[in-house]
Image: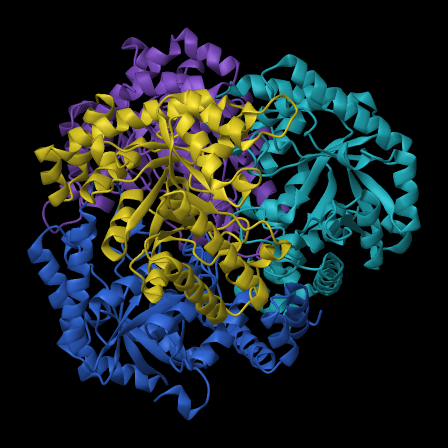
Chain colours: A blue, B cyan, C purple, D yellow
Amino acid sequence: MTSTRTGRHRYAARLNAFRASASAGKKPTVAEMIKAAGHVGGLTAADLNYPDHFAFHDGVALARLLAENGMALNGLAMRYYTDPGFAIGAFTNPNPATRRAAIDLTKQGIDTLAEMGGRLMTLWMGQDGFDYAFQADYARMWDDTVAAIADVADHNPAIDISIEYKPNEPRAFALMPDVATTLLALREVGRPNTGVTLDFAHVLYADEMPAHAAHLVSRHSRLLGVHLNDGYGKRDDGLMAGTVHAVQTVELFVELDRAGYDGVIYFDTFPDQSGLDPVEEARTNIRLTERLREVAKVLTGEAALASAIAAQDAAQSQRIVAAALYGA
Amino acid sequence: MTSTRTGRHRYAARLNAFRASASAGKKPTVAEMIKAAGHVGGLTAADLNYPDHFAFHDGVALARLLAENGMALNGLAMRYYTDPGFAIGAFTNPNPATRRAAIDLTKQGIDTLAEMGGRLMTLWMGQDGFDYAFQADYARMWDDTVAAIADVADHNPAIDISIEYKPNEPRAFALMPDVATTLLALREVGRPNTGVTLDFAHVLYADEMPAHAAHLVSRHSRLLGVHLNDGYGKRDDGLMAGTVHAVQTVELFVELDRAGYDGVIYFDTFPDQSGLDPVEEARTNIRLTERLREVAKVLTGEAALASAIAAQDAAQSQRIVAAALYGA
Amino acid sequence: MTSTRTGRHRYAARLNAFRASASAGKKPTVAEMIKAAGHVGGLTAADLNYPDHFAFHDGVALARLLAENGMALNGLAMRYYTDPGFAIGAFTNPNPATRRAAIDLTKQGIDTLAEMGGRLMTLWMGQDGFDYAFQADYARMWDDTVAAIADVADHNPAIDISIEYKPNEPRAFALMPDVATTLLALREVGRPNTGVTLDFAHVLYADEMPAHAAHLVSRHSRLLGVHLNDGYGKRDDGLMAGTVHAVQTVELFVELDRAGYDGVIYFDTFPDQSGLDPVEEARTNIRLTERLREVAKVLTGEAALASAIAAQDAAQSQRIVAAALYGA
Amino acid sequence: MTSTRTGRHRYAARLNAFRASASAGKKPTVAEMIKAAGHVGGLTAADLNYPDHFAFHDGVALARLLAENGMALNGLAMRYYTDPGFAIGAFTNPNPATRRAAIDLTKQGIDTLAEMGGRLMTLWMGQDGFDYAFQADYARMWDDTVAAIADVADHNPAIDISIEYKPNEPRAFALMPDVATTLLALREVGRPNTGVTLDFAHVLYADEMPAHAAHLVSRHSRLLGVHLNDGYGKRDDGLMAGTVHAVQTVELFVELDRAGYDGVIYFDTFPDQSGLDPVEEARTNIRLTERLREVAKVLTGEAALASAIAAQDAAQSQRIVAAALYGA
C-alpha cells in the first residue's frame, strides 16, 4: 500500500495525539485513539508504539482496528519504558543485562511488525546519551550502540531500521543528536536495511536546514521516515506543519521529491500542548501540508528558480519563492 | 513627512548595505551609498550613522544628498567607534571620562539630528555589557546606563531617544539584551521622550515573539522604530524580510496597526553576507513586505480569526492565517 | 526557623526527586519521599506541591512527616493539573471559569500554607503562554495574569507570592519567560507581598547571567527563592549544582550575600533523568554547594578582585577567581 | 619541535589578539604582534594567517621573526578575503573561476607552509554555507567542497589539511557546522593527510560536549588541532580558557591524552572584545590551562572515577571531579 499507487504521500497519525478523545476522565484506549484518528479523514496510515500500544491488543487486533478506520500500518516505533533501568540508557546502559533487554525488546517489536506485514521499525533512542562530563565512556557507548543497531538490523534483514535523531530530552545530550552523527553511526553499523527518520522540529533545533538534512541522508544512507511538524528551533515544539517555517517546509518537499521519497508523512504534533481538538488539529495539518506540497510542485518546475539557485542569487530566488508561496 | 499622509509606512534604507555600490576596489562613499539606495525605488527614508556617515559631509550636505535621491531623514543611529576605549563600554565604561565622552558624542549626534530637522535618535548600546562573571559591577553598569540615557534624553526633550536591544555581539551579554530588560531600564530612566526600536532578527534570537514584544513596548513605553528582516533565532542573521517567518511578520504588522505605529520600516538586512546586489535585495525586501502587509490587513478584519484567538483555538486560527497567507 | 539562626542557608529538598525511593513497582507516596529526603542528612527544608502532595495527607500530617525527618516547610509550589483545561492556561485560560478555578485553587493553596505556618507560595505558571502566532491575545493574557497575581496576593497579605520564571515547556513560549518580563509583570501587579524565584538552569537558558538576574530582582522586586542546579543553557537540565557553571554559581552566591538573601537553597535537580540514587545525588549537591559557598566567601573579601571588577579587567579578575576556585 | 620532547603541549598564539600592541593610532604590523606575543612568556608557537600575515613579509622573514620571539611555526590558517567574490563562498562559490581561485590560493598557502618547514594547514571554510532555503544546491556545494579538499590535500601529501568547523558566522549556516558533518565530508574526501581542528567555543555552540567531539574525531579521522577558549554555547565568544566550563575543559584534556594528541594548544580568544591587555590575557589563559591540565592528570589516574564512569554513576563521578577540581 505505497503512495506510488496514488502518486502522493500518505498521511500518518500520531495516535497519542488523540488522547483527548478518551471517554471523559478515563485513560484513553488504543481503540479510541485509532477511531478518533479515523475521523479526521485523510489519515490513511499510522505508526504504533511498541510495546505501549500492544498492552491490551495483539498485532492482529491492532491491524484490524486500523483497517476498520481507514488506516494501514506504516510501522512501529520503539519505546523503552518497560524497564526503569532504561532511564539511563537502552543500548548504552552500563548494565549488559539491560542492554540485552533493550535489544531483545526491539527484536520482539521487529517480530511483531513482521507478523503485521509491516516493514519499518523506527528507533528514537532518547534514553541513550549523557548529562554530565565524566558520566560515561563515549567510546563504549558508541560501540554498544553500533553493535545493538547491527544486531537488531540482522534480526530480520527484510525489516528496515530507521534511526530518528533528536538533540536532547530526556537526556541533556542524546548520543544521536543530529543528522550527521546519525549517518556516521549508520556507516559504522554498515547494514543495508538501515536509514534515517527526519523530524522537522528536531531538525530545526539541531540547527539544521531540513532540505539539507534530507540531502545528507540521501547522500549517505536512506531516508525512511519523515515526521512533519514545526517549531522555533529551541525544543521539540510539535507544532502544526507549515505554521512557522513554510518556506523550509516547501524546500523539504522539493528535496523529498528529488530523492524519490515515497514513504508516509507522519504528523508528529502535540495538540494537547495547546489544548486543541486533535481531529481539527490533524485536519489543519493536512490542509496546510497539501497546499505547501502544491507550492513545491510549482517551484520544482520553475526554471527561473533553478537559475537563481545555480547562481546562488537569493535576491531572485526568494522573490520567486515568495511569489509562489504567498503571492508576493 | 509622516506615513499618515500616505496611509502607509515608509521604507527606510540601511545605507551600509549599499557598500557594494562603491566604485570597484574603492571604499564606498556615503554619497555613493545614498545614490544606490535611491535607485531601488520605494526607499523614501534613511537612517544615518553618527558620527560615521558625517566623516566627509555635514548634516546639510547629507540632507541634500538624501533629498536628491528621494529620501527623507528618518533619524540618526549612534555608533561608538571613535574611541577605542568604547570597546569595553560606552555608557558602562569603567572610566568616567570615557563614559562622559560617549554621552557627549551622543549629544553632538542629537544636536546634528535637530539641525537636520530629525526627531529620532536610535541607540544600540552594543558595547555595553559583559563577557565574564566577576568582570563588572552590574549595579554600577545599570546606574551608569540609566543616568546616561536620562542625560541624553534631557539634552533635547524634543528629540526621541529609542533604545534598540540585541542579545549579544560584540559582547557576550548585552546589558540591554531583550525587550523587557529595555523596558525596565526605560522605566528607571523615567523620561517621556524615550522608547524602543524592535529589530525582528534580534527579537527572534532574544527568544521573543515579535508581536508580543511589540505589545510589551506599547504597554510600557513607546514603539519608535521597527527594523524589519528575518533570521533563524540564533544570531543577527539580517536576512530579507518575510523569507523565514512570514506568519510572525504578518502578526507583527497586525500589532503595529493596532498600536498605531506610523514610523518607518527600516530594512536592517545584510545583502553582502549573501553576495547579493543590494538594490535587488532591497526590492525583494519591499515586495515581500508589501504583500505581507496586505495579508495583515485582510486578517485584521477577519472576524473568524478574532473568534479563534479569543478561544485560543490554534487549530482554527492557523487554518485562517494559512488560507490568507498562502492559500491553504 | 530562618537561616539567620545558623548563619547559613538551609538546603531544601525537591521531594519528587525521591520517587525512586518508592517500594519496588509501586507509585511512591509522599511519606516515602519525605523519609528518603530525610536520609540525606543536610536537607532541613522542603517545598510541597499543591495540591499534588496533599492527595492523601492534609497540612498537619505533612508538617508532622517533615518534622519527623528533620525538615521544616519552606513553602508550597502550585501545580495546575487538576483541571485538564489548565493545559491551555491557568491564569491565561480563555475560559473565565477556568481562570477562576486556577485562582481559587491557588487561594486554597495559600490557605493551606498559612495553616501550616508557612509564608512562601511559589507560582511557576508553566501552562500560561502560547505556541503559535495568532493563537492568543497578548494584552488579554497580560491583563488576566496581572489581575490574577494581584488577586492571590491580596488573599493573604502575610503570604509572599513568588513568581518562578522559565522560558518554555510545556508551552513553546511562557508568558513569564525571563527575569525582566517577570519584573515588569510584578510592577504592574504592584503588591508588596510579591517577589521572584530564580532557578539556575532556567536562568541559563533564558540567556541570563545568574548574578545579574539576581541583581535585577533585588533592584526591582524581592528575591524570595533560589533553586540551585545546573545546565547547558538549552533546556531545563536539572543537573547537580556546580557541575557545569561553577564560576557563575560562585558569583551568584556573592550576589545573594550582597542582597542579604536568607532564604533556602532548593535543589531543583532531576536525579531520575540520569538514573541516580536521589539520596547520593542530594549529598553531591550539598557537598559541591558548600564548597562553592566557601569560595564565594573568600572572593567577597578579596580586595584585588574588587579592584579588577571596578576596572572591568577580566584578565585579572578571572585569574583571581580561578586561583580561589581551583587553585590556578 | 613536538611536545613529546618536553612531555607537554606547547601553547600557540593567535597573533591578531595582539592588535592592541600596535603603536598608538596605527594599524598593527605583524612584527609588532609577534613581538607582543613573545612577551607573554609561555607562547612557543603561532599560527599565521595566509595570505593576510604575508602582506609585507615572506615566509623566511616571518619564520625569523617568530624564532626571535621564542615561537615556532605551528601552521598556517587560510583566510579567504582577497577576492570579494569569496563572500558568497570559497570552495562552494557558484562561479567556477572563483572556486578555482580559492583552491589556488590554498595551494599557494600550502607551498608557503612547506617552504617554512611547517606541516599543518587549517581551513576554516567560514564563507562556505548558505543563508536561505532555495539559495543554493546542497549536492553541488558538497561535491565542490569534497573535490576541493581532495585537490588541496593531494597538492602536497606531506602537509596535513585540518578542517575547523563552526556552526555559523559569517553565513547563517556553515556547510561544515559541527563535528559529525565534518567527519562525513572527510570520509568522502578519503585522503590520509586530513583531519579536524576543534575550537572549544565552536564545539559548545554546535551543542557538543568537547571530549565527545574529540572522541568522534579520533574514531573517524585525526585530531590535528585544538583551539582552546570558552563561551556560553550561543556564539563564538572567544573567552579565556577555563573561565566558564572548567569541568568540560578538564574532560577534554583527559580525552586528548587518551587520544595521544601531541599538537599545540592554540588560544583562540578575543581580548579586544573585553578591552583586555592581550599579554595579560594570554598569561591568564596559560595559567588556568596549566592548572586544568594538572587536574586532568590527577583524574586520569583516579580508579574511583573510572569505576563511577563504568557504572555511569554521576552522583559519584561529579563528586570526585569536584573534589579534584575545586576541593569540594
Left or right of B53, for residue B276: left
Q: Nearer the viewer, residue A172 or C78?
A: A172
Q: Position of residue A264 (x, y in %)?
A: 39, 78
Residue at the image point whose x is 10% and y is 56% from the top: A98
Left or right of C266, for residue B290: right
Left or right of B313, for residue A165: left
Q: Position of residue B169 (x, y in %)?
A: 56, 37
Residue D203 visible somewhere in the drawing:
yes
Q: Nearer the viewer, residue A32 or D106?
A: D106
Count up the numbered dots. 0
Residue A28 visible somewhere in the drawing:
no
Q: Which quadrant is home to the N terminus of chain C?
A: top left
Look at the picture and state if A246 lies above or below B217: below
Q: Position of residue C245 (x, y in %)?
A: 35, 31
Look at the picture and state if A203 lies above or below B181: below
Look at the picture and state if D254 lies above or below A30: above
Q: Residue furthest bottom?
A: A5
Q: Residue furthest left?
A: A97
Residue at the image point whose x is 33% and y is 22% from the top: D287
Q: Nearer the viewer, residue A313 or B146?
A: A313
Q: Position of residue D58 (x, y in %)?
A: 51, 40
Q: Nearer the viewer, residue D160 or A6?
A: D160
Q: Which quadrant is home to the C terminus of chain C?
A: top left
Residue at the image point whose x is 29% and y is 31% from the top: C241
